Amino acid sequence: MSLFLPRRTVIRCMAAATAALSLPARSQSTKLVLGQSAAFSGPAAQLGIQMNRGAKLCFDQVNANGGVNGASIELRTLDDAYDPAKCKANTEKFISDDVFALFGYVGTPTSLAALPLVKEAKIPFFGPFTGAMALRDPFNRYVFHVRASYDDETALIVKNLTSLGLRRIAVFRQNDSYGQAGLDGVVKALQAQGLTPVAVATVERNSVDVNAAVKAITAVKPDAVVQISAYKSCAAFIREARKAGYGGTFYNVSFVGTQALSDELGKDARGVVVSQVVPFPFGTTVGIVRDYHEALKAAGGELRQNYSSMEGYLAARVFVEGLKRSRGFTREGLIGGLESLQNQNFGGFNLQFSSKDHVASRFVELSMLTEDGGVRR
């Protein structure tokens, strides 16, 4: 038997091998792995848990229906307990494992810890659960935001308070980049009306030691307190302030975790206001909320409707649409697909990306907690 192949056969084999090597490696895969670092333990755990559950509702449905152009999506998670150092380590692991993209990180200090690694690896960083301007300005082509900013949220809060004649406004904030971002937004909005906060007090991240903050703020008797922290510390502050005789109003930005805050406060939740950046998850008039309800029903179990899981679901829906529009399963292809989502209506919720703007929505509205665990607009 001859050991030699015909010259034409050799050429065809070489051409086929060269073509295969020239294709992007990710286009050969039938699974796209996303990495999510978030708090799944500790005082902020419900933020990560609910964000993840909402996203998985969408990704599981997509996978059950054949994936995106035949590719399934796996959302791989690592717990950072809302600790920037742990988030950085998790991000380094995701990048070394060559995940396709980073998705649904939770928190400002954690996301900022990941940002230098994102820039260096040139990996898409999509839908973080934070409204900090430091992640939006300066513009970064690898970072995509579905939600409005804390500047947008605090502007509406201050507008609402001052329209009610409440001008003596204090700020209770987390002592980190998240709390600073929220404070910056409040100060900016107040300055536009010739006002400044009457008091500012802090709490450490992942702590409920609020006694000093309660004393400092209640001493000046503000009309209202804007809270920039997570649900456990905000609930602790509200309870202790009311025990101290404070009868003013409490406003929170969306990151607080609306359902988690309500669960922490119980009957004490009555009248607490929270700004929201995604559609009201309990209604049926908005198409994407109906889709979310159907996904919850299909998933079974005891998953509850809430704003945090609604945000995860919405972010996943937008990510999937960008992936559908990408040219091949590459990171650059995903960026191009997402940037093509201009003037898009996602079931009644308007979103828009472009090559120069990666903040898809400026939508903000206010909601109020009720003593029976509900939320009303």
Image (cartoon, rainbow, N blue to C red):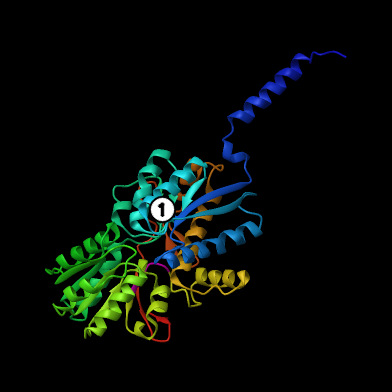
Q: Which residue is mark 1?
A: 353
For residue 155, what is the image quadrant? bottom left
Q: Give the structural element (helix, strand or loop) at label 1.
A: loop
Q: State which quadrant residue 163 falls in.
A: bottom left
Above or below, 90 against 132 in this view is above
Number of numbered discs on residues: 1
**What residue appears at the point 43 percent right and 82 percent down from the top-left corner?**
374
Give the position of the N terminus as an image quadrant: top right
The furthest residue to the right: 1
245 w.r.t. 347: above or below: below
x and y, in percent, of residue 83 in the image: 37, 56
Which range of residues does the magenta coloring cover? 274-278
Q: Quadrant of residue 61?
A: bottom right
Left/right of residue 157 with respect to residue 354 in the rendered view: left
Residue 89: percent from left, percent from top: 42, 47
* Above/below status of 314 relative to 10: below
